[in-house]
Image (cartoon, rainbow, N blue to C red):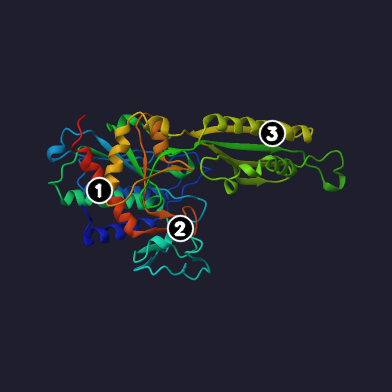
Amino acid sequence: MKLSKKYKTILLERFLRYVKIETTSDPHKQEIPSTKGQWELLHMLEEELKEAGASGVYLDKHGYLIGHFAAGGSGRKAPVIGLMAHVDTSSDMSGRNVKPQIIEDYDLGEIPLGTSGYSLNPAEHPALLKRKGDTIITSDGTTLLGADDKAGVAEIMTALVWLKDHPEVPRGELEIVFTPDEETGRGLDKFDTRWLNTRCCYTIDGGELGEIETECFNASGFEAVFQGKVIHPGAARGKLINALSMAGTFLGMLPGAESPEATDGRYGYYAPMEIEGNMDKVKVRGIIRDFDRDELERRSRALKAFAKAVEHKYPGGKVALKVKKQYANMYEHIKKDPQVMDILEKAVTRAGVTPVREIIRGGTDGSRLSEMGIPTPNVFTGGHNYHSRFEWVSLGSMVKASEVIINLISLWAVEKR
C-alpha cells in the first residue's frame, strides 16, 4: 500500500496546521497540561478524531485524549493495538509563531532558515544528503519547527483518514492516545491504563526514516538548592558564604567525560539544565541518564557525594539535593512480547523501508507506558535536530511513517488473540 498524492497533501496540510499552534510545555509547572496552548491542539484533535470515524472520544481533565475505533471486516477478532503521540513541544527553544518553510524538490543545497542568518548545510547535517528530490520542511530559524512530535500526530491522523476512506481493509479495534507534557518527563503522571484495552502500543515519536526503537535510557531528574549566607562584600571576610560559588563548585564536580557533549551510543551522562539565583540562594536543575540501571544509581550516589563535598568546602552553607526517577528502560518490558517488534519490522518492510533497530538516547511516553505493563516501542517520524532552530522533517519520510501505521493495523488484523 502506498499513499496517493491526495493523502500526501492531507498529511502536509495537517502538519503545517498543527505546528502553527504554540504548545510549548513548561517544566516548572506541576499541573498537567502545564500550558494552556496544549488545550487548543487537543480540542482540535478531539474533533478530528470524531471526523475520522472514532466510535468514542474521551478528553480527560489532564489533557489525555483517547479515540476508540471499532474493528472492521476480518479483523474483528484481532488484538487491540494502540498508537500514541504527544502534542507538546520542548521549552528548549521557542515554539511561538512558528513559520514553516517548504522546500520542494530539494537539490541537496544549503537551506537558508528565513532571514535569521542561520541555515541547514548538508555538510553539517548529512542526513539531508539522503533526501534529494524530497520535500523538506523547516522553521524560519527563529523557533523550533515542532516535528517532535506533531509529525507523529499528523502521521497518525492521516492514516486514520485513509482507513476511513478504505473500509474494506481489515482492522482490529484501535485506540489512539494523544498526550500532553511528554517533554517535561511528566506526560503520563496522571494517566490511567484502565482507559485502554490494548495489548501493545506504538509511539510515533522517532527520527530518521526506518528507525524503530525498543530501548531507552533509565532516567532521573535532580534539583540541588544551595543556601549561602549573604553579607556586604566589603565586610565579607570570614562571614560571606556565596551560594553562587557553592553551585559553581558542584557543577565543576560533574565529570566532563560523562556529559551529553562527550558521550554517545550506550554511554550515559550528567546534564545540568537550568540555574537560577544569587549569592544567598541558587537552584540547579538537571538530569542523569544511563541504559544500565546500576550506572544510573552510581550517578545518583555521586550527586549526593558532590553535595556533601560542597558543604564541607563551604562550612555553614547547606545543599538540599533531590533526585527523582523519571522513566525506565522500556526494553525490559518489550522483550517479553517478541511479536510486538516482529510485526513492526514487517510493517516497515512492507512500506519499502529497511527497518533499523536503534536505541533512544532519551525517552518517550512509551517508556512510561511500557513500565505500566503495555509494551510500547517507538517508530520513526522522519524528523531531525529536535528541540532546535535547525529542526527539519522530510515529507517523504512522513508519508512512509503513515504507511507503516496502516501496515501495522492491517498486519495485527490477521493475528489471533
Q: Dot 1, how many residues are within 10 Å of its Cα: few (below 14), some (14-19), or many (20+)?
A: some
Is label 3 in contact with label 1 (beta carbons under 8 Å)? no
Rendering coords of residue 230 (x, y %): 78, 41
Nearer the N terminus, badge 1 or badge 2? 1
Q: Dot 3, how many residues are within 10 Å of its Cα: few (below 14), some (14-19), or many (20+)?
A: many
Task: Confirm whether residue 66 shows in the render.
Answer: no
Amino acid type, label 3: Ala
Task: In this rendered view, identify the residue nearer to me: 30 or 95.
Answer: 95
Mark 3 lies on a secondary structure that is: helix
- Classify residue 287 as left or right of residue 256: left
- Classify residue 264 as left or right of residue 201: right
Residue depicted at x 63% and y 46% = 275
Q: What residue is shown with label 3?
A: 307
Amino acid type, label 1: Arg
Nearer the N terminus, badge 3 or badge 1? 3
Q: Quadrant of residue 14?
A: bottom left
Image mark for residue 350? 1
Task: In this rendered view, identify the residue nearer to me: 291 or 388.
Answer: 291
Mark 1 lies on a secondary structure that is: helix
Residue depicted at x 69% and y 33% = 307
C-alpha distance separating marks 1 and 2: 28 Å
Task: In this rendered view, identify the residue nearer to me: 107 or 323.
Answer: 107
Residue depicted at x 31% and y 60% = 12
Amino acid type, label 2: Glu
Which label sits in the foreground, 1 or 2?
Answer: 1
Rendering coords of residue 304 (x, y %): 65, 31
Q: What residue is shown with label 2?
A: 391
Image mark for residue 322? none
Residue extending furthest toward the front: 354
Nearer the N terminus, badge 3 or badge 2? 3
Q: How many marks?
A: 3
Mark 2 lies on a secondary structure that is: loop
